[in-house]
Image (cartoon, rainbow, N blue to C red):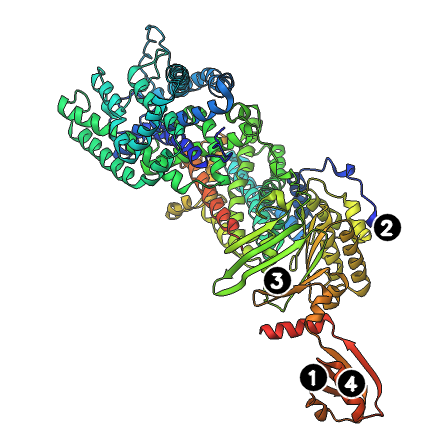
Amino acid sequence: MTTLTQPLPIAASQHAASPYAVEIRLELLRLIRSPAFALPMFVLPVALYLLFAFAVAGEQAAKDPDAARFMFAGFSLMAVTMAAVFATCPSIALERELGLLTLKRAQPAPPGAWLTAKIVAGVVTGAIAYLPILIVTAVSGQAMLSAGQLAAMSAVLIAGAIPFCALGLMVGALASGTAAPAYAHLLYLPGLYLSGVFFPLPKSMHFQAPFWPQFHLNQLVFAAGDVTKFRWISPEMAFAVVLGFTVLCSGIAMWRLSRRG
Amino acid sequence: MNTQPNGERLHALDAVRSFALLLGVAFHASMSFLPGIPKGMWAMSDNSPSAFLGDAGFVAHSFRMTLFFFIAGYFARLLHGKLGTAGFWANRGKRIAVPMIVGWPLLFVAIIFVWGLGMQKVFNGAPPAPPEMSKELGALPLFHLWFLYQLLWLYAGALGVRAVVAALDKQQVLRGLIDRAVTGSVRWGAAVLLLGLPLVACLLTTPMWFPWLGIPTPDQSLVPQLPATVGFGTAFAFGWLVHRVSGALAAITARWLPHLVLAIIASATCLYILKTQPPFGMPDGPKTAFALAFGVSVWAWVFAITGLALRFLSGHSAVRRYVADASYWIYLAHLPLVMALQVWVGDWPLHWGVKYPFVVLTSLALLLLSYHWLVRSTVIGKVLNGRAYPRRAAVVPVEVPADDEVVASLCGVSKRYGKLEALSSVDLQLRRGELLALLGPNGAGKSTAISLWLGLHDADAGIVKLLGGSPQEIARRQGLGVMMQDVELPKDLKVHELVALSASYYAQPLSVKDALDRAGITALASRPYGKLSGGQKRQVQFAIAICGRPRVLFLDEPTVGLDIQARELMWANIRALLRDGCSILLTTHYLEEAEALATRVAVLGKGQVIASGSVAEMRALVSRRHIRCETTVAANEVRGWPGVVDVSTDQAQLHIVATDAEAVVRHLLSADPQLSRLEVKQAGLNDAFNALTQEAA
């Protein structure tokens, strides 16, 4: 108690860290410490990739580099985007519900720091989930992709986390803490299958693939890697759709989060 | 620069100027969609042309630069009055000439590059040879920077004329006449009809005049062009004169509606003539009619938009201020970007209704981002806007003047949630260094009052002040600490991490160690928050509330769930903060807490302040006392005595609540001389509180 009446030194905290940096670091720590997030997000995609690309369809993938590329692109996309959605959506909904967002608004927190931290955490966890798949692909050499192609595809994949962070933001901003993960699954998972990034779709299902953002991101990934097969629309169109999707989702999220009370 | 003599910024005119500049971006973005524009006239010809954009573009382009020069003239005189001639030129050199000279080569390279890409697309990979540069004297493609060049000429002209008039008109006779003419002409509608006439005469005598483009753009030569100099010169001069007379802006404001109606009619006339006549070689009759309608439309738009802005946008708005600051940079840098986007989308098989908004919104978004990150807080921003904003403006702590004894106040504040009136014209003050305990039953409006002070909600009526300003300002909130009622912090983070995060929001926080020390939870530093007990969580929240060295502390039921030891510790902490000069607002259900800590107490009930004062005053408000004794007198008998409020018995004891205790005791003693164990007690805050809130209900 004696400390209370003594003037406390300011010097130690003069060069305090930027709230953005602290917020981002803690958001990442929080995600990595939470086993319910870290285990499925970091282990599942690479495990599935190993299972399908090397065990189940290993023979075909070894013969046909296009098949190997298809699976690489598909599972990488799953790794990146799933982490992006589930790093952002449930925590945003929960923290809104538990009053943390209200507390931050009352404190002099910079308005963008919390949201920036969520998005950065989404992108970084996406990259962490993707890294083992990249390593496996590069080491196995099955997909016959040069280092340049891999680098370009990786860049697009990691940037591709952003639209899915926006999706997570939107659902997290609209839904309640308990309902948010369910809604996120509902909006995200069907797209993973129906967009045809995991397995080639039958012709009758082609019409609906362009409705899923996963399809467009997949197209951009192939375009970046200069893979000529599996290209259905021009990269410009795909980019425009992904951009529009991002703007729409983040716009709805901002609108919702900025309304007070 | 843009201030009135009384020091207030002219927000509305700032808004008008940025509107004129941003309209230019929208206009240039429409260029590739104009129907019938010859290939090679613009960097791109879109495959989905739009007649609507053509018409809208014509109207926007007819007045946007005149509007800009009108405002420029107004601000020029304002600035000259403030800085003097030498200061004026130094300022204009930095803000106008430097951007023009530095910007031109960069824009030249960028525009030529984008234009080349566009020509490749427009002519399917076989563009014609670029036209040779004109060899005429002074020929130079100025691009859209011509307006800066024109502006410099107009400054020189205005100061020249001013010097001559000042020398000739020593008695101010001429200037007095002009001033009256300016106000009168706006008031009686002459300005809107006559100001365009010099321009009309110029346009009609210009060979090869292309009516759609209005005033021919002087972007090809350093030699001033006659129509532009006359047209924009009139606007600049009239803006200058309007600044001379105090009533002129008011006259423009009052007449925004008639001006707007006239503007629409005149522009519609112009469009009708354009649609019914050949674009080139218009016969003289329609051409004259067009020119006259054009002259009127230009000035009608200028007055209508200026008037609208003065009428509706005079107040300060952080967003408009930001956009106004950004608009100069946006306009300077927009052309290559807009063109690049036009070239990119030009052959997409999409409708213009998709592509045009895409071009406008994407370019504005990128330009705003570039402004925010490259310009606003850098030397470029300093040159363009006269100041560089610090990147984290929020951390500048706002010092409350020493004589300001009230650190937070609600003044006539009302707040409704739907049909529920949570607060109705409440006045409350938190004074420096005091602890104000806010009491009241559930739903009395305590949490609403706190949320208004924290800037979480806006009041429907009345004024909410925190540390001398609005709690919505993040700089004010630098001085507050808060402990809220229903907050759950992330359970996977450790205590010291949570405190560090909150500390990072403040400019001069305590170190994490000190904050934990003060709250008495150093031992918990490395424990995950989710593993703590309810009381420990409250202590962590207390540490978070005090980590920013707050001058005002809001504690919403801080000791709920604490054991006695922890509560004593928190009380001691609160007292220590009070000794350090911190002002505290505390809500609580524990009345003994208010009695132990409060300097003042305010009781809320049904959204109103029922009573406020010191703890003693509050007790006195209800002058009840409790009498206990062992007696043979029956409770029912006592109930009838004067001054008795309530009687109850437990075991052998009689318990009386009385307003006039002395009289009741005398009565008791005379009725039962054997009476024993007599005890008379002053009522506590608890009773006062119950009495007050029951009265309110």
Residue B110 image position (x, y, % from top left): 44, 19
- Secondary structure state at the residue bearing disc 4: helix
Mark 1: amino acid: Gly
Which is nearer the eye, B268 or A70? B268
- Secondary structure state at the residue bearing disc 2: helix
Which is nearer the eye, B272 or B467? B467
Subunit that carries the residue with mark 2: A
Which is nearer the eye, B130 or A227? B130
User: Distance from label 4 to label 1 (Cα)?
Assistant: 11 Å
Frontmost of labels 3 and 4 is: 4
Subunit that carries the residue with mark 3: B
Residue with the mark numbered 1: B643
Q: Do labels 4 and 2 share a chain?
A: no
Neighbours of disc 2 within 10 Å: few (<14), some (14-19), many (20+)? few
User: Distance from label 2 to label 3 (Cα)?
Assistant: 33 Å
Residue with the mark numbered 2: A2
Which quadrant of the rendered structure holds the C terminus of chain B?
bottom right
Residue with the mark numbered 4: B665
**In contact (CB < 8 Å): disc 4 and disc 1:** no
Frontmost of labels 4 and 2 is: 4
Residue with the mark numbered 3: B446
Mark 2: amino acid: Thr
Left or right for B112, reference A142: left
Q: Considering only order in the chain, which callout, 1 or 3, is on the residue closer to the N terminus?
A: 3
User: Distance from label 3 to label 4 (Cα)?
Assistant: 40 Å
